[in-house]
Amino acid sequence: MKISLTKIAALVTMLLFASSTKAQNADYVITVQGDTLACKISGLGFIRYGYKTAQMKTQKPILLSEIKEYYLSKEGVIYRKVYKRPNKPRSAEFLRVIENGKINLYEETTTTVSKDAAFGASASSSNKWYISKGSDTVKVLKNSDISLATLFFKSKEKRKNDFAEMIMDNKEVYDKYLADDKFSFEQIRALVHLYNTGELFKDQPK
């Protein structure tokens, strides 16, 4: 049975497309040396992940000393190694990337479990957003926690000024920030997205 060259070309194109799509949907890690490794990432104990490439016989833990970024394809989320204090290696953490570009926006979620005699255990969570521009050292930008701990949180005016300085070199975004005069989670993300992409932010599933 003869197969035409057109059909063969179509089949090859389909295979290449499928391969490309699969690669884009794969987990990966980026080592501190800058090597990107396609792999499978899965749980490795309490709040820790491990990875395994096709060449590895066993899974390796994702360590701050070895990995600077990893991507979970199932969640569509990047986690990146950042420093909360400059030149302090012990302040390094993996934070979830909310917006990725010239300006990076990160999220840290803290869950607190409390016990009550009448209602038993209950859990609550708070979000803290960090920001960076041209650096792997982040600044705290916004905190959803309204407990007494926020008394030690740097003033809102100082955080608003820090944000304004980062977007000042983009007139469209800066003017919108001044005109709207808002500092909500939604507004911050919308402005960072507009700064990085030139496009308005559209809600995306997490």
Image (cartoon, rainbow, N blue to C red):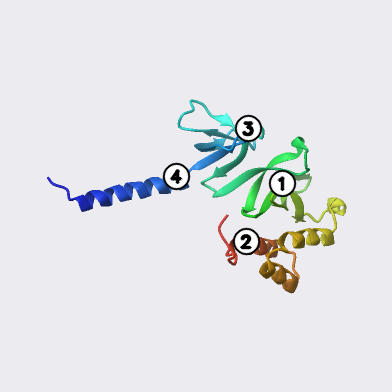
Q: What element carries label 2?
A: helix
Up the image or down, 173 lies above or below 16; here it is: below
Q: Which amino acid does label 4 sit on?
A: Ala
Q: x%, y% of residue 32?
A: 62, 35
Label 3 sits on a secondary structure element that is loop
The residue identified by callout 1 is 111
Task: Name the residue tied to disc 4.
Answer: 23
Residue 15 higher or lower than 49, as above or below? below
Q: What residue type is labelled 3?
A: Glu
CB within 8 Å, label 2 to label 1: no
Residue topped by disc 2? 193
Residue at 64 percent across and 55 percent down: it is 102
Count neighbours of disc 3 (C-alpha within 10 A) and say few if under 14, some if 14 to 19, many if 20 or more: few
Residue labelled with disc 3 = 66
Q: Which is nearer the N-term, disc 1 or disc 4?
A: 4
| Rendering quarter of residue 67 | top right
Between the residue at mark 4 and the residue at mark 3, the CA separation in whole angstroms equals 23 Å
Residue 77 location (% of width, % of height): 57, 48
- Which of the two labelled residues, at mark 4 and mark 3, occupies the earlier sequence position? 4
Q: Farthest front residue?
A: 169
Question: Mark 4: few, some, or many residues within 10 Å (few <14, many ≥20)?
Answer: few
Instruction: Name the amino acid type tagged 1.
Output: Thr
Q: Which residue reaches farthest left?
A: 1
